[in-house]
Amino acid sequence: MTQAHLTLISIDLSFHAASAGLVAAVLEKHGISVSEWRAPHERAFELLASGQGDILCSAWLPGSHGAYLAPFEQEVEKLAVLYTPYAMWGVPDYVPVEAVSTLADLAKPEVAARMIKTIQGINPGAGISRFSREIMARYRLDELGYHFENGSLEDCVGAYEQAAARGDWVVAPLWQPQYLHWTQRIRELSDPDKLLRGKDEATLLIRKTALAKLPALALKELRALAPGNQAICYLDHLTGHQGLTPREAAAQLGQ
């Protein structure tokens, strides 16, 4: 009998790889061989839409990735909500809350004078990047010398860690879950205008054409997969800071 095979697509960021490790562990436990393909946000959804991928881990719905899924949503099934992520802008907790508690506070002249002006983000297709550009425009932060930069995850994390090590005032465009929260004390800024869209559901997607490849027990286990934000943050810490592979990290949770 030929072994079933599935191609698992994950968005090319560490916490997506960490959660994909849990999914791959479930599939392999039930005798399904897995190929993994990591790609930037838009490309990941293109691969799933074209049928080059069978499963995507995971779509942040509806806010961050809903527009990418919409053109082919009828071709996939939503298997499980793995965690409830959300985008955020945050500052180190040593920045006085009386000075900076909301996004609008960044526009105070006395705050702008203290803040590092480069707001280092990740790739332009990420929801946090789109939302961050809206925040820049809404509060006219560019007029105060701030500028938002796209870059890699390493650029984003490194900029924050270096600033925090110096004790500088810095704002980071981040999200939950993310491994920085495991080692750093980051205070989320309130977002009264809802520019960051609130909570999403990190949804495991499978093409309906691939459902037949899944044994009933594997499908049942995937539908029940719900590690939650704290577990994903821990897995991300294990892979991003401790050097474990996603499969090794998944084993730490007993998967």
Image (cartoon, rainbow, N blue to C red):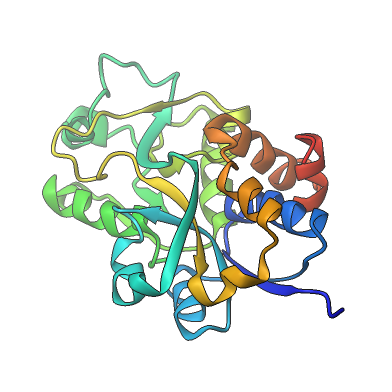
Of 224 and 9, nearer the camera is 224
Q: Is residue 245 at least partly visible in the picture?
A: no
Q: How many labels does the image show?
A: 0
Identify the residue shown where x is 19% and y is 46%.
Answer: 144
Please state if 157 lies on the left or on the right of 241 as rendered: left
Q: Residue 114 falls in which quadrant of the image?
A: top left
Identify the residue shown where x is 76% and y is 74%.
Answer: 4
Tell me where residue 29 appears, x and y as whole percent. 81, 53
Task: Decide: is 141 above or below 56.
Answer: above
Tell me where residue 212 appears, x and y as whole percent. 61, 71
Of 153 and 44, nearer the camera is 44
Please state if 74 lies on the left or on the right of 43 as rendered: left
Q: Residue furthest right?
A: 1
Task: Decide: is 168 above or below 139.
Answer: above
Identify the residue shown where x is 40% and y is 61%.
Answer: 126
Of 214 and 37, nearer the camera is 214
Q: Residue 236 falls in which quadrant of the image?
A: top right
Q: Is residue 15 at least partly visible in the picture?
A: yes
Tell me where residue 28 appears, x and y as whole percent. 80, 59
Task: Decide: is 228 above or below 37.
Answer: above
Task: Decide: is 209 above or below 144.
Answer: below
Tell me where residue 120 appears, x and y as whole percent. 43, 52
Of 196 and 151, nearer the camera is 196
Please state if 103 lies on the left or on the right of 68 as rendered: left
